[in-house]
Amino acid sequence: MADAPRRILVVQTAFLGDVVLTTPLFRALRRIYPGARLEALVTPEAAPLLEEDPYLDEVLPYAKKSGEGFVAGLQKIKARHFDLLLAPHRSHRTALLSLLSRVPLRVGFADAGFARCYHRRVPRPLKLHEVDRNLELLRGVGAGPVAEDRVLHVGYTPAEAARVDAVLSGAGVGPCERLAGLCPGSVWATKRWTPEGFAAVGRGLRERGYRVVILGGPGDREAAEAVCAGIGPGAVQAVGTTPLKALAAWMDRLELLVTNDSSPVHVAAARGTPTVAVFGPTTRALGFTPFHTASRVVEVDLECRPCGLHGGKACPRGHFRCMGDVAPEALLKACDELAEEVALTGGLAGRTVGKHHGKAVASRADRAQGSAADRPLDS
């Protein structure tokens, strides 16, 4: 393609966290092609995470698993006459969708399913963080990433902030209380640490002066209620009270987040929220650690880890020690270390809650992620 593209599509129809980890690619493409129209094709569930992205012109929902999803998605792409398509998602379905779209230049990963559907196939270095692997797609258009590209973005509007404030006010939370969030859910059963463990951490955080808020989606309600009951008086059960787009607003209200290896890890990184994450069936080497210097990963060393890229419905060996052996004391120690580090570095000093003008939703994350640029995966 001799001329610069006028219309660009990024196809990322994987899980919520994968979508967040693709946002630096939008930033990079806007830098390289400032005059192009840039759009993203994502699942309807993930679309709210991108609605306030300052580098996107439009977010296209694609219900890939519905009866008419594939055909409707294909028609949506064809109608917009894109010049360039990039596919961070490596599924066979995405490759076929890209091929049949007849976009003149299609860029995907060499290890993608049906990779020959792409004109240019880019190596995907496993040693890199997923953010950097996604940015490698720029090689397919003769460009490359720069340090300034390596910033996650998840925004929100005053409406989401108001909903969060309403939930907290309704629970009797004062405006100056220190908040710590717990996210006990995950799409994958083996990625869920025990409710008893989260409750023990919640009690420990309460003793340290935090008001504890349990967060998650509608499917996490049962676990959240168990955690809330285990913590006792003062805990706020906020699961299902606000939409997904408000998760970023929640992160801006928290001083600390404790979570499984799931999408809140990456939303927290985008907002610069100090995070302690429990890794069970997955490991740091897979490349999905918190993209944020103010973070800790707690895990146990077992020869059977990792047992898969995402986790699964049950432990393949039946013992589930990767989660069962994680002690609440280890997480509380990580929380203490992180709180001390943040206090010493002034990590929350630049926190911004109120800048919701247009699409330029600010966070404290740019500085934190910038210093994470050279952080090795096993740090």
Image (cartoon, rainbow, N blue to C red):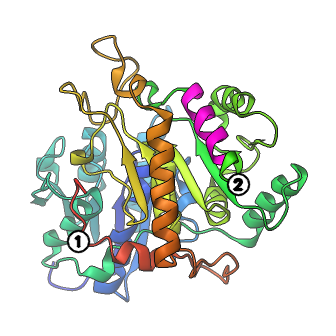
Magenta part, dominant SS? helix
Circles 2 and 1: CB distance less than 8 Å? no
Residue in the foreground of this view, choosing between 293 and 88? 293
Point 38% across, 56% down: residue: 290
- Please provide the residue range marked out in magenta: 195-205
Q: Could you tell me how far apart the alpha carbons at marks 2 and 1 are, in whole angstroms?
A: 34 Å
Per the image, the residue denoted by label 2 is: 209
Nearer-the-camera pick, 31 or 115: 31
The disc label shown at residue 374, or none: 1
Q: Is residue 58 left or right of residue 128?
A: right
Q: Nearer the viewer, residue 200 or 44?
A: 200
- Quarter holding the N terminus is bottom left
Position above or below: 256 against 147: above
Residue 167 percent coordinates (x, y): 82, 53
Q: Residue at x 14, y 69 (%)?
A: 140
Q: Residue at x 59, y 77 (%)?
A: 351
Quadrant of the frame with the C terminus? bottom left
Location of residue 193 in the rendering, given as x and y in whole percent from the top left corner: 48, 30
**Residue that sits furthest to the top in the current view:** 318
Q: Report the amino acid beneath label 1.
A: Asp
SS at mark 1? loop
Q: In the image, what residue occupies the spot 43% across and 64% down?
A: 294
Residue 17 appears anywhere in the view:
yes
Q: Under tag 2, what secondary structure?
A: loop
| Mark whose residue sits in front, 2 or 1 | 2
> What amino acid is found at the position of numbered circle 2 in the picture?
Gly
Q: Residues within 10 Å of mark 1 (few under 14, many from 20)?
A: few
